[in-house]
Amino acid sequence: MYTIRSLMRQCRPMSNRYSCIRLMNGQAGVSIETSNGDDYIPDLSLNQRTKLARIAADDDPPFSEMIDIYFDRASRIMEQELCESLPGGVHLTTQQRERKVRGILAIIKPCNHSISLSFPIVRDSGDVEMIKGYRAQHSHHRRPCKGGVRYNEDVDMDEVRALAALMTYKCAVVNVPFGGAKSGVKINPLLYSEHELEKITRRYTVELSKKGFIGPGIDVPAPDMGTGEREMGWMADTYSM
């Protein structure tokens, strides 16, 4: 968690410079145009630059891949400083420090666990409808995981995984001892009655519990888009049964 916190805190002063960035495909490769008009060529590997070029050319690039690009860039900026400030690294050679820091960064980046759920509910009309839900746990370095539950018809696994990663980084920056997580249920809550929303919320909680994706020492949900204290009450009540 020290590494994540250091990485994000040290990169925050650059946020103003890159607050209005635009990805461009240039003749000499991919560049980033900053808000002050300067072009900046990222110090990225060939694979990362290829990925960045693909994202730049995509009208709707995957959210999680955009998060990965920024993580890779921040890692390259901070790698030397992280090596120099590595706890317990005074007895290690330069190469050993670099390997250890790169290994820690490689562990931080991916999402640890994710799950996709489908379950039926009976609507007030008597029709049966299948509901799709997701939960991602990005980091187990500090437990429990925490993250909001959003009800939105456009939510998908990519969005949930990306938001879970951002939650890990936000917790680390302020030194809150939680790992990042996120949930999504693919519905428009305005199209369901309160009774139907309660059914969906309680069944979703049961499904998460069966898979070990909820619990006070495991994974703690929170309100997000389309949810509030009512849904959290239903979840807590269902989990306690």
Image (spheres, rainbow, N blue to C red):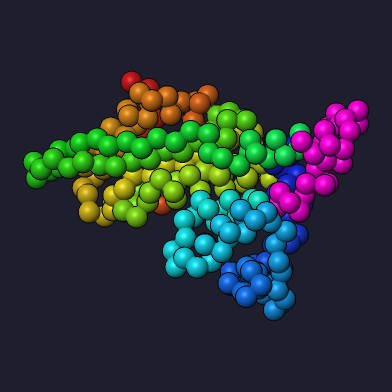
Q: Position of residue 5 (x, y in %)?
A: 71, 43
Residue 59's x, y, as percent? 44, 68
Q: Can the viewer see residue 53 in this picture?
A: yes
Given residues 119 and 178, the one toward you in this image is 119
Q: Magenta span has 76?
A: yes
Q: Position of residue 24 (x, y in %)?
A: 59, 72
Q: Is residue 151 left or right of residue 179?
A: left
Instruction: Specify whether residue 234 is in view.
Output: no
Q: Tell me the quarter of the image containing the N terminus.
A: top right
Q: Residue at x 58, y 30 (%)?
A: 140
Does residue 156 show up magenta in the picture?
no
Q: Main secondary structure of the magenta part?
A: helix
For residue 50, above or below residue 201:
below
Residue lying at 24% horizontally and 35% vertically, measured from the top left: 119
Q: Nearer the viewer, residue 162 or 30?
A: 30
Q: Position of residue 227 (x, y in %)?
A: 38, 47
Q: Which residue shows up at 8% across the image and 41% down it?
A: 126
Instruction: Specify the segment rendered in magenta.
Output: 73-99
Q: Quadrant of residue 154?
A: bottom left
Placement of 40 over or under 120, stated as above or below: below
